[in-house]
Image (cartoon, coloured by chain):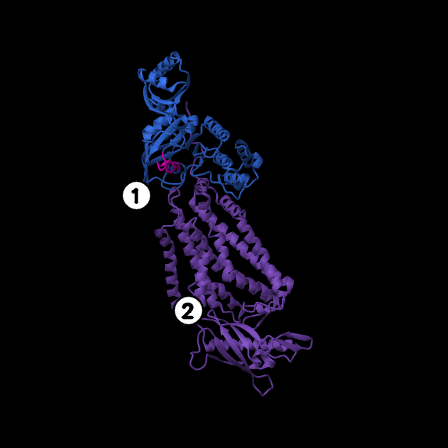
Chain colours: A blue, B purple
Amino acid sequence: MQRTPAARARGISKYYGDVVALDGVDLDIEPGRVHGLVGPNGAGKTTLLGLLLGVATADAGTLEILGRPVGRSLAVANRVGGFIDGPGLYPSLTARQNLTALAALRGIRSGRHERVLAALEQAGLTEVADVRVRGYSLGMRQRLGLAAASLSRPRLLVLDEPTNGLDPAGKRRVHRVIEELTDDGVAVVLSSHRMDDLASVCADVSILVTGRVVFSGPLEKLAAESGEVDYRLVTSDPDRARAIAATTPGIRPVRPETGPRAGALVLRGPVPSLDVLVNRLVEAGVAVRELAPVVGPLEAAFLALTGGHADEDGAA
Amino acid sequence: MTATLAPPDDRLRPAPLLPVLRFELTKLLTQWRIRIVLLACLVAPGCFVAVVSSQSSLPTDTVFGRWMHATGWAGSLVVLAFACSWGLPLLTSLVAGDVFAAEDRLGTWRHFLVAVRSPRRIFLAKATASLGVILLMVTALCVSGTAGGLLTVGSHPLVGLDGHPLSTGDAARVVLVAWSCVLAPTLAFAAVGLLGSVVLRRSPMGLLVPALLALAMNLALVLPVPVGVRLTMPSNAFLAWRGLFNAPTQIGPLLVGIAVSLSWAVVATGAAYLLFVRRDFSDLAYDGAGRRTVATAALPLAALLAVTALAVGALVPARDSGIDEHKLEASMSTAYAHLYRLQTQVLHRPAVTESQLHTRTVCDKGGDRVADRGPGNDWRCVVSWRLPGATAVGSAIYQLDVTADGRYVADGDGPKEVNGFFPVRTPSGDAPNPLWQFDGYVDLL
């Protein structure tokens, strides 16, 4: 059976005056998969999410949502949900009031009360359901926003940085909800500035740079395109380790680390050469305490494609 | 893996209007600011009227203020007069001026638009909800002021602005009509508030637009501008209800005021609607009103002002202030005759009718060197009358302070037996002298 994309964009362009926000973007969002959008600030992520959600119309190109072409009017199919630029909640209302009103707007008549309760339960907010949202932490608001977005059981869910401001437990909870949704066949599009976030939940990724898609495809393909990455080597004897690394075939010392990580070496080379290096260090009596990529392969690919610079903490 | 999409309910279907409207009302009524204002509208006028009615000093500078001891209906009209000065434009600022801007401030537009899927319905729901809340506040003001007066003083006949008595039933009816008439200019300012809220977004200026417009118009109305200009402003309808308390009713300025106000409401709402449905909600960088947008919003109102001025100019003959000695003389004669009859009743003298008095008035403004026209506090009128069967002609002198809106306060200047003192002696004790000082209203048309 032919698989219908949840969203399909061809040659989408969007302008704000003289500013080109999107320039000929092609995109395919598959059902049952999480598609990450990543790019530097101003790359056009939010604009693209806005087109998918129907809060804006493209100036050129074609866009199909759930198999239906989107016209020039601000409207999208019923089974599309999500949020951009924050979860969009009303602070003077309680979580229950927010969700109940949203359910009414979405035309949910039968079992509205149960749906709201289930959404609150899923977001872990049952205990504070009748507290005004102005008293919520950022993480609680994010979770409530996700609950609101998934309340109408959308087939396409568009989320703008859904884990922003969440602690690790909160992130895990959000990721779990997203996985449950994709298991049900929901297509999820989410944007993030953090490649590690995307890597843990996305199956596909599109990288946007100044309004253009520079990569779109499965995460594994992106990782494969990253090529050689830099590794950090921490040993018991940095001087001897540097000397051994310099004579190991395929290994190129890049630079010594400075600052808090002074004494570590940054090397580049294929994985088999790194294996040889580790063996030689052990034979020479040098203890290997750490050998790990300076940045992840996905992030390395991202930086290579966007022309960015490596950041030690892994944020892009 | 295979998957199927496009279930049957994937059609483009905006949210029904009723839930959107209910949501808008919920959002408005859960705001502390709105709740406090609504509570104040419900409590403050009643308390004010009750307290003032219980004191010896009355707000005589406010129309009907001097009658607050006499009847509870006067309290409602004093509240109406205060509300028309600032209260109602401020209410429209607080509600309509913020109804769109609040979504910008909270960052909820995209969320709301995705849920409703129809900017048109959002606009309709927001406009209707804000209008409903404003009407609720106006109703609260009316009910509270009226209840405060009736509970404190009681339901007694009211004296109109030409001195004629209104029975309690008539007073109730005319007070209700007066409150209803000010809904038209309230609508106009609410529409301007909607427009400001759509155009200026999260800027505080959006909230202030109706209040600033009311300030500008109130200042203009204080000046002796020609009647044709005065009638082009919706604020004029906040004053024109006073004509209901004359006999015959001064209906002309009221109808013009209502028509002008409704025109403003339609044009401002239409402009707000067009600007709103054309808004691009995806542009995060745009935060506020560009000159072009402001001009787009201001131009229709400026054009309306010009068209109204032309139309009113063609319909209304008066090109000056609309106040001259003939109008004042007629108004004073009528008011004096009615009030003389009332004084006769208070003093338990033999009954007399207005027509038997043959009242005549001669007015002069500022002596021979000043033209007898226009507002000012230098008007002097001499009223003469003759009692049935008497050969002598009585006369009384009044100093008049005439304001540009046609209202005047006549202050008795003798003889002391007629209008010289505030109290008059009656067999049952002292009573207020209705001829000592009274309000009147000149038809500017």
Looking at the picture, tell me which residue is in the foreground, A78 or A187: A187
Mark 2 → mark 1, Cα distance in angstroms: 48 Å
Which secondary structure lies at badge 1? Answer: loop
The residue wearing badge 1 is A18
Q: Amino acid at mark 2?
A: Val
> Horizontal and vertical percent for residue B109?
44, 43
> What range is drawn magenta here?
A40-49
Q: Residue furthest top?
A: A283
Rendered view: A229 above or below B326? above
Q: Is residue A287 magenta?
A: no
Q: Amino acid at mark 1?
A: Asp
Q: Residue furthest bottom?
A: B391
Is A240 positioned to the left or the right of B190 in the image? left
Res B225 label: 2
Q: Could you say which quadrant of the image residue A191 lies in?
A: top left
Residue at 54% of width from left, 46% of height from top?
Answer: B30
Rendered view: A289 above or below B113? above
Quadrant, the N terminus of chain B: top left
Is residue B427 something that shows in the picture?
yes
Q: Chain of mark 1?
A: A
Is B127 positioned to the left or the right of B286 in the image? right
> Horizontal and vertical percent for residue B335?
54, 75
Res A156 label: none
> Horizontal and vertical percent for residue A314?
40, 28
Which secondary structure lies at badge 2? Answer: loop
